[in-house]
Amino acid sequence: MLKYRLDEEQVIAVKIQQAALDYRSGKRTLFTVESDNVSAWTRGMASFQRDNIVKNSYLIPGPPTVRESHTEAISRHVDGAALAH
């Protein structure tokens, strides 16, 4: 938990979590691009739907590999707090 002091009375607490945002919380399959000859920005492409990666593969030089992994997804409401949208 990170804490940031706004002034002598106000402190903001921030909890950093490695998770994907989704409409519901839980385990999800996440598809990403994996290739040695791709630009750094393409490694940031990710989707819960494989077809979204495949249909945008024309942006990537050479045949990319679509990697499947499992991740924890969190919804817009976490521990009673609303995430920004």
Image (spheres, helix red, strand yellow):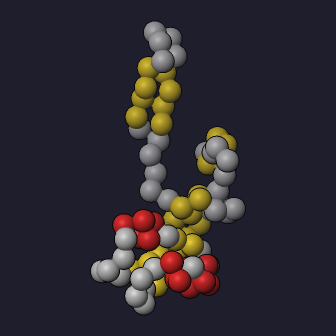
Q: Give the number of marks.
A: 0
Whether residue 24 sits left or right of residue 44 in the image: it is: right
Q: Quadrant of the N terminus?
A: top left
Residue plotted at (44% across, 20% down): 5
Q: Quadrant of residue 80?
A: top right
**Residue found at the very far bottom of the displayed protein:** 63
Whether residue 52 is situated above or below residue 78 in the rendered picture: below
Whether residue 5 sits left or right of residue 20 in the image: it is: left
**Residue found at the very far left of the displayed protein:** 36
Residue plotted at (44% across, 46% down): 16
Whether residue 44 sits left or right of residue 24 in the image: it is: left
5 and 63: which one is in front?
A: 63
Where is residue 30? Give x, y as percent.
52, 75
Residue plotted at (59% across, 74% down): 48
Where is residue 74? Give x, y as percent.
59, 58
Whether residue 65 is situated above or below residue 80 in the rendered picture: below
Whether residue 82 appears in this view of the structure is yes
Q: Quadrant of residue 55?
A: bottom right
Whether residue 35 is situated above or below residue 9 in the rendered picture: below
Residue plotted at (30% across, 80% down): 36
Whether residue 28 appears in this view of the structure is no
74 and 60: which one is in front?
A: 60
Q: Quadrant of residue 50?
A: bottom right
